[in-house]
Image (cartoon, rainbow, N blue to C red):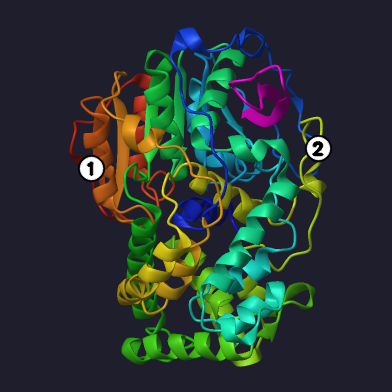
Amino acid sequence: MLSTRQRRAFTCAMTLALLGAGLPSVATAADDRPDLSRFHDQSIKWSACPGDGLPDGLQCGKVTVPVDYAKPTEGTLDLAMARFRATGESRGSVLLNFGGPGGPGVGELADGGEDFMGLTNGYDVVTFDPRGVGRSSPVSCGEGTDDSAEATDPGQDAEAEAEAESEAQADESDDPRAALEVLRKLAADCAEHSGPVLPHIGTVDAARDLDVMRAALGDKKLNYLGFSYGTRLGAVYAAQFPDKTGRMVLDGVDTLTEPLSEQGITGAQGQQTALEDFLDWCTEDINCAFGQDSRSAREEVLRLIGSLDEAPVPADFGMPFSGQDLVGAIGQALYSKELWPALSQALTALVQDGDTRGIMSFYVGGSSLPHRDGPREDGGLVDEGEIPLDNLPAALMAINCADDPDRPTADQVVEDLDRLRARYEQASPVFGRYRLAQALMCYGRPKGTSYIREEVRDVDTPKMLLVGTRGDPATPYRWTTETADRLGPSAVVLDNKGEGHTGYSSSKCVHRKVDDFLLYGQLPADGSSCGSED
């Protein structure tokens, strides 16, 4: 089993990954909004969380929100929530989002609540499964995800891609449009299995859910700690509800402006650097699967990936484990140095014995897992055992594309494919192909909102704390400063001169400064730093 911090690293790491569907409602003038008082006036009924092995004191509840904020009488859905109560006098709640997008918060708080116990000195520590995620009307793409992965893989033979979906004619074997048709079919599969939440799954709607939760918790202002994707959610909330924004911390700051194709290149570069750092470390150990020379180890990694793409090995449920599956698993493990020993052991088992169990523990793609049912028709919470096993990648696809307005045509994709492939492979010989495959996943989806790029700027809120980590492979430090400039004078930057994705769990200095701000309002000076060993 993975540790709490490992799971959090996985969840946050997905910020830049697969892309998806849905067109969220954009914010409208307050006078034009429908009456939402029945949602804001609700109270949450807390009780002990169901299930075995949960930490003492964890309570669960739910809040009801409209599926479509523009038409709040035409359907609702429940959002799963959990909390640890304040140990002393409570000044309200601090709401946590652990990232993703697509990461459920309730299980994360249950597994990793010890990291946040300091905040219970003044707050109820609360989290939630966002709409479309976990127990909250989970979206799914059914059993078509494997075909989509083949279709979007630039290294796959186009004839094989087409055969997997539609038995295309042989003369189409060199036409990438056959692969694009597979993606169009996947979009239909996602809509079929996801229910009415899918067109309303983006961050604009999720931010409005935050405000319903704030009101239901009885807080006049939202106090918030968001990691990775959670920083995007926090920034959108601050833009929509500046007068309701309290003490806000954004750790591992996401971009608000870069198109998804550029985000993919950034992710490939960051992961390549992290892989090289890992191999430098690994090759100092005689048990490293790739020997004791870091330069030749890089070549061995490429050879292993290539051999598994040519001849996948059996994995869980009898499904094949390919080289690109390995790339995805390694990529997740590289977001925290704490995972490196386990990754090294898993790679040794794979290389020496063909044993995929260790490396599969890092693989969160979900496409090789059997399908389960998606959301309930009445919008109620689903049972834990009924969450679709592809929910994380399906939700991640849906949310990222719902937040992005770019939809190139088939002609544009075909025209740009070679250029994009070259840029991605230059960014990373290991992760470039994998990242480019993901960057094509929005094809066939409705255009997303332009609100985040165009409207989230110069927020009129109290000071908020943005934490950027210099060695972050997922959200580069420059995104922290760029987003701070975008948000305006309210943003205060803390420079964490460490490694890994986000700083709260890995840096005692960051942890202390974040807690001091949330609990006591003690804000560090803009541009102050935490050392790499703090």
Instruction: Tell me residue 320's x, y (percent).
Output: 70, 80
Q: Residues within 10 Å of mark 1 (few under 14, many from 20)?
A: many
Q: From mark 2 to mark 1, how far is it between C-alphas?
A: 42 Å
The three-letter amino acid code for the residue at tag 1 is: Thr
Q: Main secondary structure of the magenta part?
A: strand
- Say what secondary structure mark 2 lies in: loop
Front-lying residue, 55 or 479: 479
Image marks 2 and 1: residues in contact by CB distance under 8 Å = no
**Measured along the vertical axis of the image, is residue 336 above or below residue 112?**
below
The three-letter amino acid code for the residue at tag 2 is: Arg
- Say what secondary structure mark 1 lies in: helix
Instruction: Tell me residue 406's x, y (percent).
Output: 41, 49
Which label lies toward us, 2 or 1? 2
Q: Give the labeled residue for mark 1.
A: 481
Residue at 65 percent across and 82 percent down: it is 169
Of marks 2 and 1, which one's residue comes earlier in the chain? Answer: 2
Residue at 33 percent across and 67 percent down: it is 269
Front-lying residue, 162 or 139: 162
Q: Give the labeled residue for mark 2.
A: 376
Instruction: Tell me residue 433's x, y (percent).
Output: 44, 75
Residue 471 appears left or right of 387: left
Span shown in magenta: 58-83
Q: Which quadrant is the N terminus positioned in?
A: bottom right
Observer able to see residue 359: yes
